[in-house]
Amino acid sequence: MIVTRFPPSPTGHAHIGSYRTAIFNYLFSKQNKGKFLLRIEDTDKARSKQEYQDGIIESIKWLGLEYDGFSIQTENMPAHKAAMQKLVDEGKAYISKEEAKDGSGAIKEIVRFKNPNKPVTFKDLILGEVTDNTTDLGDFVIGRNIEDPLYHLAVVVDDMNSEVTHVIRGVDHISNTTRQILLIEALGGRVPTYAHIPMVLGDDKQKLSKRKGALSVLEYKKRGYLPAAILNAATFMGFNPGGEKEIYTLDELIEVFDITKVQKGGAVFNQVKLDWFNTEHMKLLSEAEYLNQAKAFIPEEIKSKILDTVVDKILLANRDRISYFGQLTDVFADTYMYETPAVDTSLLIVPEKMRKEKMVTIESTKIILTDLLGLLERAGDADFTSIETVKNIVWEYAETQGRGIVLWPLRIALTGKEKSIDPFSMMWILNRDEVVKRLKNAIATLV
RNA sequence: GGCCCCAUCGUCUAAUGGUUAGGACAGCAGGUUUUCAAUCUGUUAACCGGAGUUCGACUCUCCGUGGGGUCACCA
């Protein structure tokens, strides 16, 4: 049985690079019908916070990475202490009286591992054979004192006890690996198989970090990204199944993932490409799913003053204009979507470059808008049932007069904005009465 | 600096000794039912350098160079 684990320390809100490690562990274990364990490494009590632990669990659940086992490292302390005592008893570790590093000058008893000083070689699923001379590590510390075990010891004991078979983690841990192997050997445990995955880099090609603006996974959740897109994008940093397909669901990822094909070099994180992945995954949503999820991102005070049916229309008309739900905030910030806008007369006049040789004056604009108003007043309710049918109301007229000449002032009359959604979608959202009202308003400004 | 790891378009990558070095994102150009967005089409752009091995190297070896990681009583 294959067992992998993801052991974050609850000392901050982790970003996409950290969770990619979780994803690779998850993918590998699931495709082998194995187990995926989540372990909170909180041996650094001073920096660990419940808030961060909650964030980790929330993120993992949101991403859909169901774990088969959960543990909190400090709860396994008795086992860590027993292991440390055993090493000391067997002469493989010793207690050393040293001056405390906290500047107090006090002398305390720390526990050091007696380094056998030999080169350690292990086989890495991604890197191949890795050898490291451990002598320069010295007799490294494994406990603050005989009662207080540190990271390396705790990890090794926990992994042994939970029978972890594969340790998949970032290459930044590679030098930890050799010293942990030393500990496993001293404890008489079985050395797991390792796979060191490349770092996720920032634009500066250095390890991605929050300090350099990397967003936490929780932040992406808040901004309305789809977990499926995060999963897909994260996996593709360092892995590629070959072929030209790039959009994969979690199940498909489990299917095609191959740890041995993971890239050796680091991958620069690209926010723009993440947005693209999200756009593509949004297209995979059914209309009902889209609407349902989108509604959570409409500011309450705005939602309460618009009819549900109109909200749906606004959402649908803007569907392919957003790449993540958080952008809905901008959509609704354009109040013309649901409130009659003030119209600036000068905007109504078709800009020069779009006139196509035609004369455009205040008078001609007024005539066009008046003609349009007539067409719309005469339209039936059925004409407003879809964007397509709405378009048919004015299309013939626009064709004969010149599309730009007609559609430009129409759109401005409806939105009051130089840049906006198209007039057909707008009329569909608004329905006849409001369209007629806005046209009349616009005509009134043309003196 | 010691030790370790890495190296294909700007970015993510495909290629597993023989390809016009492919795709995606971004960029650029154009089309489209006006604008913005979206969308469609086309297009610019890469094998870090030098030796070797070989009939033949992006692919294998070595040496450079460059980049990164790590050197805690953090994890």
Image: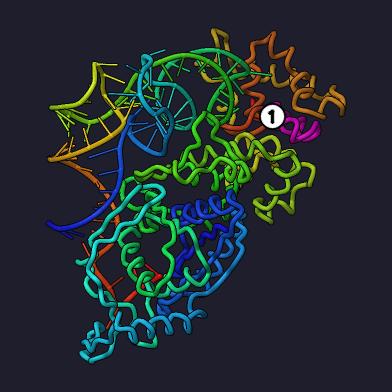
Q: Main secondary structure of the magenta part?
A: helix
* Quadrant in which the N terminus of chain A is drawn: bottom right
Residue A444 in the image: state x and y as whole percent. Answer: 69, 29
Residue A302 in the image: state x and y as whole percent. Answer: 68, 52
> For the residue marked with disc 1, what is the amino acid?
Ala
Residue under the point 33% across and 83% down: A90
Query: What's drawn in magenta, residue-wise?
Result: A423-440
Q: Is residue A135 visible?
A: yes
Q: Is residue A341 magenta?
A: no
Task: Please state which of residues A345 and A423 is positioned toward the viewer in this rendering.
Answer: A423
Task: Please state which of residues A146 and B16 is positioned toward the viewer in this rendering.
Answer: B16
Task: Please state which of residues A89 and A137 is positioned toward the viewer in this rendering.
Answer: A89
Residue under the point 58% across and 33% down: A417
User: Is A301 left or right of A168, judged from the image as shown?
Assistant: right
Report which residue position mark 1 lands on. A444
How many circles with numbers are drawn on the protein? 1
Residue under the point 24% across and 86% down: A96
Q: Is residue A330 visible?
A: no
Residue A21 in the image: state x and y as whole percent. Answer: 47, 54
User: Is A251 left or right of A372, judged from the image as shown?
Assistant: left
Residue A230 in the image: state x and y as whole percent. Answer: 54, 47
* Quadrant in which the C terminus of chain A is drawn: top right
In this rendering, the answer to whether A248 lies above or below A375 is below
